[in-house]
Amino acid sequence: MSQRDLAKHLGVSLGGVNYCVKALIDIGWIKAGNFARNEDKRVYAYLLTPKGIAEKAALTARFLRRKMDEYDALKAEIEQLQAELAADGR
């Protein structure tokens, strides 16, 4: 996916995507390399670095923990509502 495609998909400007990609390169989360044999020298591959992979794993773990907490809260709320209905004789 090109930066232009990514910008369109996310609904942000191409400049914004480019700025963020450069920032991710600067902090070492991704590495950019172009395809030497490609006629279009603007074509790049962006690869996650080991640091980027670790951050993605941590982000995924935080997301899953948050979703499990939401699930547990919803489950508890459903159980409470069921208990209230049972107490009312429904």
Image: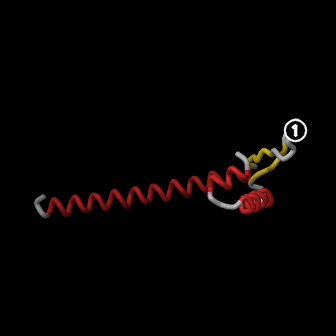
Q: Amino acid at mark 1?
A: Glu
Query: Circle 1 sits on which residue?
Result: 39
Q: In the figure, is residue 36 to the left or right of 49?
A: right
Q: How many marks?
A: 1
In which quadrant of the rendered image does the C terminus lie?
Answer: bottom left
Mark 1 residue crowding within 10 angstroms, few (<14) / some (14–19) / many (20+): few
In the depicted view, which residue is nearer to us: 17 or 51? 17
In the depicted view, which residue is nearer to us: 27 or 20? 20
Residue drawn at 81 percent across, 44 percent down:
43
Q: Secondary structure at mark 1?
A: loop
Residue 53, how many percent across, how many down? Answer: 69, 49
Report the colour scheme.
Answer: secondary structure
Q: In the figure, is residue 73 to the left or right of 2?
A: left
Residue lying furthest top: 37
Residue lying furthest left: 89
The quarter of the picture where residue 88 lies is bottom left
Q: In the figure, is residue 74 to the left or right of 35?
A: left
Residue drawn at 84 percent across, 47 percent down:
42
The quarter of the picture where residue 12 lies is bottom right
Residue 20, how many percent across, how many down? Answer: 73, 61
Residue 10, how many percent across, how many down? Answer: 62, 56
Residue drawn at 76 percent across, 47 percent down:
46
In which quadrant of the rendered image does the N terminus lie?
Answer: top right
Residue 23, how many percent across, how many down? Answer: 77, 61
Residue drawn at 37 percent across, 61 percent down:
73
